[in-house]
Amino acid sequence: MYRLKAKARLCFVLTRGAMRRNQIVLVLVWVMGIYATTLLCATVDYDHRALLIDGKRRVLISGSIHYPRSTPEMWPDLIQKSKDGGLDVIETYVFWNQHEPVRGQYNFEGRNDLVRFVKAVAAAGLYVHLRIGPYVCAEWNYGGFPLWLHFIPGIKFRTNNEPFKAEMKRFTAKIVDIMKQEKLYASQGGPIILSQIENEYGNIDGPYGAAGKSYINWAASMATSLDTGVPWVMCQQADAPDPIINTCNGFYCDQFTPNSNKKPKMWTENWTGWFLSFGGATPRRPVEDIAFAVARFFQRGGTFQNYYMYHGGTNFDRTSGGPFIATSYDYDAPIDEYGIIRQPKWGHLKDLHKAIKLCEEALIATDPTISSPGPKLEVAVYKTGDKCAAFLANDNDNSDATVKFNGNSYQLPAWSVSILPDCKNVVLNTAKINSASMISSFTTESSKADTSLEASTSGWSWISEPVGISKADSFAKIGLVEQINTTADRSDYLWYSLSVDLQDDAGSQAVLHVESLGHALHAFINGKLAGSSQGINSNKHALNVDIPITLVAGKNTIDLLSLTVGLQNYGSFFDIWGAGITGPVILKGLKNGNTVDLSSQKWTYQVGLKGEDLGLSSGSSGQWNSQSTLPKNQPFIWYKTNFAVPSGSNPVAIDFTGMGKGEAWVNGQSIGRYWPTSAAPNGVCSDSCNYRGPYTSTKCQTNCGKPSQTLYHVPRSWLKPDGNILVLFEESGGDPTKISFGTKQVASLCAHISDSHLPPVEMWNSDTKSGKKVGPVLSLKCPHQDQVISSVKFASYGTPLGTCGDYYHGRCSSNKAMPIVQKACIGSSSCSVGVSTDTFGDPCKGVAKSLAVEATCT
Ligand code: GAL
C-alpha cells in the first residue's frame, strides 16, 4: 500500500482533466489494491514497428516548436493550433546557451522556461519529444553551445575529450533532473515520451575519426544511464548503438531503414520549408510535396514523423546562428512566424493526418506488403484479419498514372499518393488540396489611420557611436587577433585600430588589403568610412578585400570594425572556424609601388560598442539628443523613439525599410538583428513552383531582388498600451522616420475545388452510412472564432482561372455561383458549398468544372 501511494503521487502531474481522471482511476486501484504503475504512468518502449505507449504501438505525428523562438504568452495558442492541425507530439530542442549563459548560472525564465513549455504541451494533451542535444545546430548561435565552453582548457567539442564530455554530461543530466523533479517524463505520468542525444553527428563525423566513434558510444551510454524511462534517439547516426534508435532527417525519408530490425522507422526532421538567410531568397516548400513525402514515409513502414518546423518563430536577440541567418525563422512552416496558420499548408496536412489516422489500426498491426505495378508506381498494403489499409504511389514527376488494385482502377496524379483506409476507397490524394488557402497582409498604422510614423511617435532622438576606440577597456597587442576568442561573443563588434605615419605618401591613392575570417567588415580611414565587405558562403564566410583609400600627410588612423553576424552552427569543428581580421592587412600601391604589411603592428582593440556598455538599448539612460537635426543615412547612430501600440489583437511587426543594418530593442527586449538592405539575388527564384519532382531547399524560392527581410516581429506581450520605447543601433546608415509599425492579418480566404476532388476527409464513409453519395465540397472558415465572412470577392463555377487574390472567370461560368456562395457564407464564421452541377447547374456540358471563391472575414 505504501508503494502504491508513492507511485500514485509520482503520476499526479498531468493536465487538470487528466489529473481528475487519474484520481478516479487511483481510487479504483486503491480499492482493488492493485499496483498502479502501468495504469497511471505510461511506459514508453519500442519494437521494430513503432513506439509503444503503454504497450500499444502508435502512429505519431509530431511538429517542432522551439520555445525561445516565441513567447510564453504565445505558447498555448501555438500548441492548440498544432493540436487542431492533428499533431500528437511537440518536438523541441533544449538550448544550452539560453539556459547557462555563464557557467553554473542558470536561466529558466521567460522564453527560457522549458518546464512551463513542456507543461503547456501536457495541458493540451500532447506528448513531447525533448531533443537535449546539447549540440542542436538549429540555425542557433554556435549550435546552442555556450561560449564559455570554448574557453575550458584542453576542450575539444563533440569528440572523445574528457573536459567536453564532463560538461555535456553535466548539462544533459541537469535537464533530465529538472524534468524528473517536475515529473515530466511519461514514465512519471508526464508528456515526454522521447529524448534525443547529439544531433546529426553522423553527417559530419568523418574528420573526427576513431575518437568520434568513441564519443558517440560514450554519448549513447551516458544518455541511457540517466534513466529517463523513455527511449533515446540519435538522428542521422547510422551507427547509433543499441538501445538508441537512429532516426532520419531530410525532405524525404521513405527509403530510410533503421540500423536494427528491432527499431522502428522514425523521421525526426521533415523540413517544411527552409531557413532564411540575410542576402538570400525566401524558401517555400509546396504542401503537395510535403504531403507526398509524409504519405510515402507511412506507406513504407514509418510510424513517427516530425515536421521541422511546425512553427519556426523568430530569432530574437543575437540568438540566430550562422553566419547570416535572418531574424525571421518562419521556415514556411504550417504556422507562420507570427502564429497565424498558413493555408493551405496547415489545412492540407491536417487532412493528411486524419487520413493516416484512419489507417492506424492496420498500420500498427502489421508490416506492409509492397509491390510495384509499373515503373515508379508502388502499392503498399497493410492487411491482417479484417483490417486493411493501402497506399498507392505514383513517383513519376511528370506523368499521371492509372493503377489497378484489388480489381479497381485508381487515377494517380504525378508525384502523389492516394490513401485507402479500407483498401477500396480513396480518402485523400496528396496532390489534391481540399483545404482553403489564405493571403496574409501587413497593414501599417499609417495606412489605417492616415497618420505618418512621426505623428504616431513623439519623434526621434539620437546618440552617435564613436568610430574607433572609445572605451576604457580597450587594449593593445602586437599582431592581429581572432575575433571570437577575443569578444567571447559578448558583442557582434570588434574594433581593430592602428595609426600609421606615412610622410611620403600624403594625398596619395592607395589600397588597403584586408583578409578576414568573416563575417563582415567596415573600414574607416581617418574617421571616414572607406569601404565595407562581407564574407562569402563558399569560403566559410571569409573575406578578402581591396579598399581604395586616400592618405594624408603624417599620421593616418585605420579603424577596422569586424563583425560577426550569428556564430557558425554547423559542420565538423565549426566551433573553431573562427572569425575576424586574422590578416594579412596590407597597404598597397603606395608611392614607388611600395607595400607595407601592417599585420604585425601593435593594434589597439575594443570589444563592443560604447553604447552597448552604456546600456543605450534600454532607452532609459544616456544623453539622447533631440534638439539638433536628426542625422540620416549616417553610420553608427543610436536612435530612440516612443510609440503607441498598434490597435487590435493581431500580431505586431515593424517594417524597417529605409534602415541599413543593426539591432533593435522594444522596451529593452531585443527583437533581433535587422538588415533590410541585405537583398536576395536575382535569378534564383521561380515564378511558379512545380511541386512534382524531388524538392531541394533552393527549388522554390521567392522574393528575388528584394530585401531578404523587411518585417520584424514584436510580440504583443512586450508592448504596453502606450509609451513604448524603440531603440535602434544603426550601423551602416538609414532613415528611421521611414520605419512603420503595423499588424499582420489574414486579408483573404480562398478555395478552388474541382468536381474531381475527393469529398472532405471528415466525410469518409458518410456515404456508406447515409446511403447518399458525397461529392467534393468547398469549405471556408474564418481564422478567428469571433469573425464572420463579410464579403465574397469572387465566386465562379465553371472553368475559373488564376490564384488566390487573382482569380478570374474562365470560358465557362455559371451565373448562380455568386448568389449561392453569398447566401451560404455571408454572416457565418464558416460555410460549405457542394461542388457539383446539382448546386450550380451545368454551364458547359462535358467539360471538367471547378468552383473558385475568394472571401474576406471581419
Ligand atoms: C538539420 C539540423 C537542424 C537544422 C536543419 C536545417 O541538419 O539537424 O538543427 O539546422 O538542418 O534547418
Image (cartoon, rainbow, N blue to C red):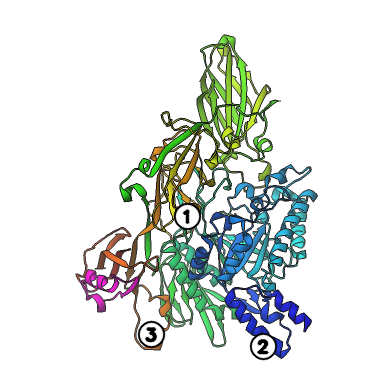
Residue topped by disc 2: 28
Mark 2 lies on a secondary structure that is helix
Quarter the N terminus occupies = bottom right
Which of discs 3 and 2 lies nearer the camera? The answer is 2
Q: Is residue 837 magenta?
A: yes
Q: Residue 575 appears at what percent x and percent y?
A: 67, 44
Does 226 sit above or below residue 145?
below
- Horizontal arrangement in the rendering, residue 831 relative to residue 136 (left or right): left
Q: Residue 627 appears at what percent x and percent y?
A: 43, 30
Residue topped by disc 3: 767
Of the residues under marks 3 and 2, which one precedes in the sequence?
A: 2
Q: Which mark is residue 716?
A: 1
- Horizontal arrangement in the rendering, residue 337 relative to residue 856 (left or right): right
The residue type indicated by label 3 comes to Asp
Mark 3 lies on a secondary structure that is helix
Alpha carbon distance from label 1 to label 3: 46 Å
